[in-house]
Amino acid sequence: MAAGKGKRNGGAPDTVADSDVDAFLAALEHPARDLVAALRRAVLGADPSIAEGIKWNAPSFRTREWFATTHLRAKVGIGLILHFGAKKNAIADGGVAIADPAGLLQWLAKDRALVAIRDADDLATRGPALQALLRDWIRAMP
């Protein structure tokens, strides 16, 4: 199976090729379009196992399961929603332990958090911490 082409239960692809993400971003009318592209590069650069696709009408990322979706409707900048897959998972009542020494995570639920990115400078400053956080998140995937 090529990167970026997932299949659900042997059926139709549940993600699209990278060129479709390129097309989505080229057509995106968003004041932070360049920031979305920079966030995409940062996420993909965090680990070679990360693939991408359009899921939930936004650039989204996966390894063996979906774990991150770009949040394009933030009031300031953009966000990255981190989650534990497209389906409800059996997450412990207390949630999961994710190291976050830079304080990037805003927990939305026990299985979902937001990383807010204000602008390109914010992403550049916190990029290495974000990539380390993403690697920890992937390891914590059920």
Image (cartoon, rainbow, N blue to C red):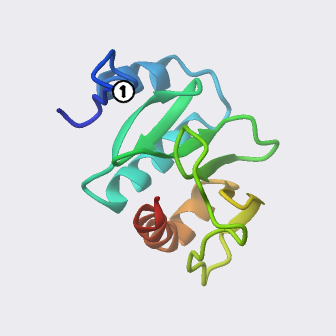
Tell which of 71 and 13 is nearer to you: 13
Quadrant of the snapshot with the N terminus: top left
Residue 8 left/right relative to 128:
left
What amino acid does circle 1 point to? Arg
Q: Is residue 84 above or below residue 102?
A: above
Q: Is residue 64 above or below residue 1?
A: below
Residue 106 left/right relative to 36:
right
Q: Residues within 10 Å of mark 1 (few under 14, many from 20)?
A: few
Residue 67 left/right relative to 81:
left
Q: Residue furthest right?
A: 75
The residue that appears at 40% across and 19% down in the rendered structure is 23
Q: Is residue 12 above or below residue 52?
A: above
Residue 27 left/right relative to 78:
left
Q: Position of residue 113 (x, y in %)?
A: 68, 58
Q: Position of residue 15 (x, y in %)?
A: 39, 26
Mark 1: secondary structure: loop
Q: Is residue 59 visible?
A: yes
Q: Position of residue 98 (x, y in %)?
A: 57, 75
Q: In which quadrant of the rendered view does residue 95 lie?
A: bottom right
Name the residue carrying label 1: 8
Tell which of 101 and 86 is nearer to you: 86
The residue that appears at 58% across and 23% down in the rendered structure is 57
Q: Residue furthest left?
A: 1
The residue that appears at 68% across and 77% down in the rendered structure is 103
Q: Is residue 35 visible?
A: no
Q: In which quadrant of the rendered view does residue 125 lie?
A: bottom right
Tell which of 35 and 48 is nearer to you: 48
